[in-house]
Structures are given as structure tokens and as C-alpha cells.
Amino acid sequence: QVQLVESGGGLVQAGGSLRLSCAASGRTLSGYNMGWYRQAPGKERELVARITWVSGSTYYVDSVKGRFTISRDNAKNTVYLQMNSLKPEDTAIYYCNAVPALIRYWGQGTQVTVSS
């Protein structure tokens, strides 16, 4: 059973940066494609970035392309999301999970708030 703990969120001004971390415990993330999801108030949760296990190839939703970078450190069993040039519309709770998401792996998420 994997437990995922997200951290690194906070309040930042538009144009600022944050780096989110997702630490896994309980078992290794080996073999899992991993992703960062976000849920803004009144909206459905969406996948914003994904990184594969085999090749490390990445995917980004159009709204974050060129601003966000997903990476993983398999030795540390951790996935990261570097977020630059943040916009108010990036405000949301950010979660990590496998891709496709596994219901039992949802954590508490980390709040990101971008002020204008």
C-alpha cells in the first residue's frame, strides 16, 4: 500500500514560483507512471502533468506547458512539480497519484494560492 504525501504549496504572487514534492512511503513507485492533479474550487480534478516510469517522458495540459516541469527521483521515491510564472488561475489543491489515478492513493494534497 502506497501513501503519498504532498508538500510545498503556499501563497505566492502572480509570476512567482513554487516547487511541490510528493513523497511515497509503504512501497516503491517503481513501475508507476505518476502525475500531478489539481482541483480548483467548483471545478473537477484535472491531470496537469504526467511522467512515465519507463522512459521518463512527460505530458502537460496546455494551460501549464512551458511553465510547469514534472520530474521524479526514483532513489528518493519522490515526484516533483516545479511551477514557474504562476497565474491566479493556477490556484487549486494539488495532488499526486498514479496515472491512471488509483482511488486508494489520493492524499490530502497541498494548497497553492496565487494572488494577482
Image (tube, grey):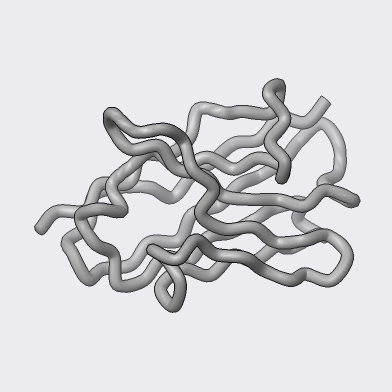
Specify whether 55 is left or right of 57: right
Q: Viewer-proximal residue, 34 or 108?
A: 34
Give the image quarter of residue 13.
bottom left
Q: Percent x, y for residue 85? A: 29, 72
Q: Viewer-proximal residue, 15 or 77?
A: 15
**Quadrant (top left/top right/bottom left/bottom right) for the N terminus:** top right
Vertical side of 74 occupied by 101: above or below: above
Give the image quarter of residue 115.
bottom left
**Quadrant (top left/top right/bottom left/bottom right) for the C terminus:** bottom left
Q: Residue furthest bottom?
A: 66
Residue at screen point 67% across, 68% down: 58
Specify whether 115 is left or right of 58: left
Q: Percent x, y for residue 72? A: 70, 62
Q: Percent x, y for residue 91? A: 28, 47
Residue at screen point 77% across, 52% down: 33
Q: Residue furthest left?
A: 116
Residue at screen point 72% across, 30% down: 102
Vertical side of 14 occupied by 113: above or below: above
